[in-house]
Image (tube, helix red, strand yellow):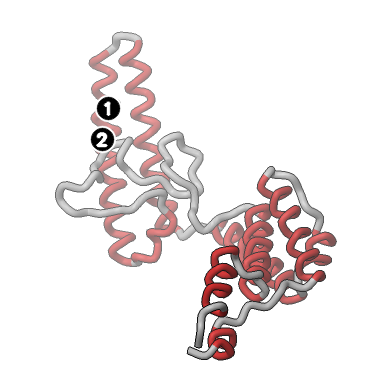
Amino acid sequence: MPKERFIQTNPRREMTAEESKRLNKLETIAGTLKRGENVQNRQLQTWLSEDEYAQLEYEWKEQLELRSELKDKPSDLKRYEEKLKQATFNYNRAEGYSSKGNHSTAKKFYNKSESLCEDALEILQEILHSDSSLRVWFDRDISFEIGGNLSADIASLPRLVTSRSHEKLSDDSRLTSKQSVKLAVVERAMHIIGRDAAPASKDEVSNLDKFLNTGD
């Protein structure tokens, strides 16, 4: 391969002074965000491109719309949530009586709680069979297969991602903080600068030198 062709097929342009300055500023901003400290929008506007800043605003608007959507949960989910709430109430009463040694009364509330859990499980099967997209509202993967970890008891029944229950396994994976949105956009901007204008690495320079110093 001629030397000229090697250089043409392996283009590496130097980062301009302006790109280097911008990259340094963005790295500083990213560090600030990772420490949980706030970065003002005007600073982001200064160092992000117009399109990148517009993307930041768009992604945060999506987050706000999602939060608004979560406040207005479908009525079928409310049915399930109410049944689970009743089951939890009875379970907590059973625990209270049990701790006081009143085991006969505790057993009645345990049985009532179990019955309500079975009702909740039936509602869950019904609503997910009717609309599988509602799965995104729950804190865990749901499988009704035999041998799965889903059963009619307080611990294993899924919670809604909007729940404040201690039994909830996770929040809505679609939700992210404004800080995280800013950081993601800044890191993408840094990646683009590095991708489009990255100086050659030491290994690449060494390999290129070796190639250029060999005979044709």
Identify which residue is drawn at 58% across, 84% down.
7
Which residue carries the number 1 mark? 110
Say which of 136 and 153 sits in front.
Answer: 136
Which residue carries the number 2 mark? 114
Give residue 168's position: percent from left, percent from top.
Answer: 43, 41
Marks 2 and 1 sit apart, C-alpha to C-alpha, by: 6 Å
Identify which residue is drawn at 35% across, 29% down.
90
Give residue 91's position: percent from left, percent from top.
Answer: 34, 28
As drawn, the label of residue 159 is none
Amino acid type at mark 1: Tyr
* Residues under numbered marks 2 and 1 in contact, where contact means CB atoms less than 8 Å apart: yes
Give residue 127's position: percent from left, percent from top.
Answer: 33, 60
Instruction: Give residue 70's quadrant in the image.
Output: bottom right
* Secondary structure type for disc 2: helix
Say which of 149 and 88 sits in front.
Answer: 149
Up/down of 167 relative to 25, above or below: above
Dot 1 surroundings within 10 Å: few (below 14), some, or many (20 or more)? many
Up/down of 101 relative to 171, above or below: above
Dot 2 surroundings within 10 Å: few (below 14), some, or many (20 or more)? some
Give residue 108's position: percent from left, percent from top.
Answer: 25, 24
Say which of 64 and 38 sits in front.
Answer: 38
Identify which residue is drawn at 48% across, 89% down.
1
Amino acid type at mark 2: Glu
Up/down of 88 relative to 124, above or below: above
Instruction: Give residue 133's quadrant in the image.
Output: bottom left
Residue farthest toward the top in the current orientation of the protein: 101
Residue farthest toward the left in the current orientation of the protein: 146
Describe residue 65's horizontal placement relative to residue 165 as left or right. right
How many numbered discs, if any?
2
Describe residue 36's horizontal placement relative to residue 2 as left or right. right
* Secondary structure type for disc 1: helix
